[in-house]
Amino acid sequence: MNGAPRHSIEVWDNDGIVNTQSMLWPKGENVLVPGDHMDIVGQYKLRKAERGGGRKYRAYDLLKSESGFSERIFKEVWKEIFAFCMGRMRLD
C-alpha cells in the first residue's frame, strides 16, 4: 500500500472530524491512506439498497471528502488489519 500523501499536510487540514496531523502514525512505517473517518468503515460511495428492504441506499459517501478512497484501498487496508490481528504482517 502506498501511504504517501498527495500533498503536504498543513495544520488546518482535517476530515471534518479530527485534524489530519493528529491521525498520523507517530513513528515507523507510514500507514497513511487517503480517506476520511467514514471511508474506512465502507461509507465512501453511494450504493443502492436491495428492493423491498425499506431503504433507498445501503451506503453513502457521508463526509464527501473527495479523498480518492476506493474499493481497492478499502480491501487492502482491511486485509492488513485482519492480518495484524492474526499476528502476521500480510495475508497475501
Image: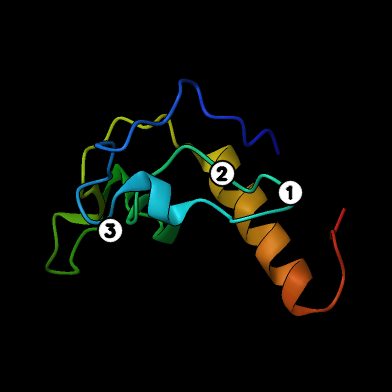
Rendered view: 82 above or below 37: below
Alpha-carbon span between mark 2 and mark 3: 33 Å
Q: Which residue does the numbered mark 1 point to in the structure image?
A: 29
Answer with the quarter of the image where residue 89 lies: bottom right
User: Percent position (x, y) of residue 37?
Assistant: 34, 56
Q: Residues within 10 Å of mark 2 (few under 14, many from 20)?
A: some
Q: Which residue does the numbered mark 3 point to in the structure image?
A: 50
Q: Residue at x 22, y 56 (%)?
A: 17
Which image quarter holds the N terminus? Answer: top right
Nearest to the observer: residue 25 or residue 61: 25
Q: Residue at x 70, y 70 (%)?
A: 82
Nearest to the observer: residue 61 or residue 15: 15
User: Percent position (x, y) of residue 56?
Assistant: 14, 54
Nearest to the observer: residue 37 or residue 52: 37
Helix or strand or loop: what does disc 1 sit on? loop
CB atoms at circles 1 and 3 under 8 Å apart? no
Q: Residue at x 37, y 32 (%)?
A: 67
Give the numbered dot on residue 32: 2
Q: Residue 82 vs residue 56: left or right? A: right
As drawn, the residue found furthest toward the bottom would be 86
Helix or strand or loop: what does disc 2 sit on? loop
Q: Residues within 10 Å of mark 1 (few under 14, many from 20)?
A: few
Depth check, mark 1 against mark 3: the one in front is 1
Q: Amino acid at mark 1?
A: Glu
Rendered view: 50 above or below 12: below
As drawn, the residue found furthest toward the top would be 7
User: Percent position (x, y) of residue 70?
Assistant: 48, 37
CB atoms at circles 1 and 2 under 8 Å apart? no
User: Percent position (x, y) of residue 43?
Assistant: 32, 53
What is the total number of numbered labels drawn onto the structure image?
Answer: 3
Q: Residue at x 56, y 44 (%)?
A: 32
